[in-house]
Image (tube, helix red, strand yellow):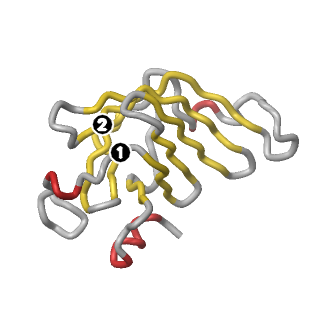
Amino acid sequence: MASASGAAPNKSTNEGFVGTWHVHGGTLLIESDTFGVSLYSDAGTDVQLLSLVLSHDKREMHVTTTGVGYISGQTGESAPLPDPTESFKPGDSFTLVFVEPHLMKMVNIRTHFQVVGNPYWCGVGLAARDVHFCGA
């Protein structure tokens, strides 16, 4: 797989998955090699609880959605998903791989809906040349 700069990823690009990652409208909090939470905000916030499995070579992380929820932007309280057909659901999965230091990409996406949007996640320390991958 080619990287954002065209080079193949290698172990030197893997600074570790644990941390806070972002993309336009979204935040991914990887708390350990086994648990994370993703948050997508618009009028409210879609929340996904994630089960994580680190590959043996520590270069990929398999992610499976285990729970979903929604927080209303008006009340700040839990509410039904406005459109469940456009949100992850339990069992949906993808793999995270590093393409540059502090830049991950979602690959092998398996969901019940067609994911439209940016597959990249940007971390603290991302090189200025790669900031455009993070969205608007």
N-terminal of the two: label 2 or label 1? 1
Q: Residue 112: tell me if it is visible.
A: no
Horizontal side of residue 115 vs 136, given as left or right: left
Q: Residues within 10 Å of mark 2 (few under 14, many from 20)?
A: many
Residue at 25% x, 65% y is 4
Q: Observer-nearest residue: 45 or 33?
A: 33
2 and 1 marks in contact (CB < 8 Å):
yes
In the displayed structure, would residue 18 be above or below residue 66?
Answer: below
Residue 120: mark: none
Residues at marks 2 and 1, CA–CA distance in whole angstroms: 8 Å
Image vertical order of residue 91 relative to residue 30, above or below = above
Please name the residue shown 42% across and 34% down the image.
32
**Residue 45: horizontal and vertical position, in percent?**
68, 43
Q: Please tell me whether mark 2 or mark 1 is closer to you in this view.
A: 1
Determine which quarter of the picture holds residue 3: bottom left
The residue pinned by badge 2 equals 61
Mark 1 nearby-residue class (10 Å; few <14, some 14–19, many ≥20)? many
Left or right of 11: which side holds 76?
right
* Res 115 seen here: yes
Between residues 119 and 32, which one lies in front from this camera angle? Answer: 32
Callout 2: SS: strand
Residue 64 coordinates in the image, percent (x, y): 41, 27
- Report x, y in % for residue 50: 47, 29
- Kindly identify the amino acid type of the residue bearing the numbered disc 1: Phe
Residue at 78 percent across and 30 percent down: it is 79
> What residue is pinned by disc 1?
17
